[in-house]
Image (tube, rainbow, N blue to C red):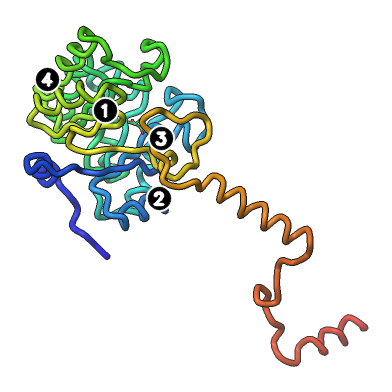
Amino acid sequence: MSKKKNSRFELQKLKDEGKPAVWITAYDYWTAAFAEEAGMDMILVGDSLGMCIYGYSGTVPVTMDQCIYHSEGVRRGAPNTFIIGDMPFLSYQVSVEDAVRNAGRFHKEAGVDAIKLEGGLRVCPQIRAIADGGMLVMGHIGLTPQSSGQLGGFKAQGRTAETAMELIEDAREIQKAGAFALLVEAVPPEVGKIIRDDLSIPVYSIGAGIDVDGQLMICSDVLGIFQAFTPKFVKKYENLGKKTVDAFTAYAADVRERKFPEDSHTYKMVEGEMPKLEKMLKG
Ligand code: KIV
């Protein structure tokens, strides 16, 4: 069933009406198609693809080309869903020019609707320049995986008054710089709520509690595919990892016991051709 794609205005309206938006990551055509069918308000082609698809231990090695390539597949799978491309490490940190050019690549080559980048005050010049370039930018604060080295690992943020206040100030600056929305990751719910109440733009959560304008989850976590570790904020709705191993194991057993393929999986010779072939073989 085809639906109308959200614009930033529908997303803003959801916030203004107090209705939570729901979004999920996708990295390929099929997942995106299923996400669209399930009625997601947005899809993020996260640089978490580095861990979920490529098996890296973090997001730092992910390149622009990888993000564009996966975003193209997602766009084809979900033509009617608002798609956000995730700016990978070093695609915007070095200069404002890099940031605008790489945000533009996501739009020109993959047809995304918006981009997201990590960081607070220090990336506000980039947010402003991308917005001035006519593109939609989402901010991302709290646990920002690209700077996990500086944060001391994949750890919750804003758990003291002082660090929570820094996040609140970052959020205000991001809104002032022209972001259309903000994602807050891995902070106490009290901090998520303060930021949501403080900002007029939508404030979304991944691990920032329920009192926000919507929730994001990683598709590989929701489906129970990602095995390396499970963050506290994850709820697994399926165990596709186990189901996949079970299916592969059953297939292997069938082959080894000569139970597969069955007659119904084979092609038939054209009527009358087998005797002819046997004659040919006898010479
Ligand atoms: O890359 C990603 O999926 C993200 C989420 C962890 C927020 O940025």
Of badges 3 and 4, nearer the viewer stands 4
Mark 3 touches mark 1? (CB < 8 Å): no
Q: CA distance from mark 4 to mark 2?
A: 34 Å
Q: Residues within 10 Å of mark 2 (few under 14, many from 20)?
A: many
Farthest residue, direction bottom:
272
* Residue position marked by numbered label 2 in the rendering: 31
On screen, residue 164 versus residue 200, left or right, reads right
For marks 4 and 2 on the same chain, the one whose residue lies earlier in the sequence: 2
Q: Residue at x 17, y 12 (%)?
A: 165
* Quarter of the figure with residue 44: top left
Three-letter code, disc 3: Asp
Q: CA distance from mark 3 to mark 2?
A: 20 Å
On screen, residue 68 versus residue 215, left or right, reads right
Of badges 3 and 1, nearer the viewer stands 1
For marks 1 and 2 on the same chain, the one whose residue lies earlier in the sequence: 2
For marks 3 and 1 on the same chain, the one whose residue lies earlier in the sequence: 3
Q: From this view, report whether residue 131 is shown above or below residue 279.
A: above
Q: Which mark is residue 208?
A: 1
Q: Residues within 10 Å of mark 3 (few under 14, many from 20)?
A: few
Q: From this view, report whether residue 22 is shown above or below residue 253.
A: above
For marks 1 and 4 on the same chain, the one whose residue lies earlier in the sequence: 4
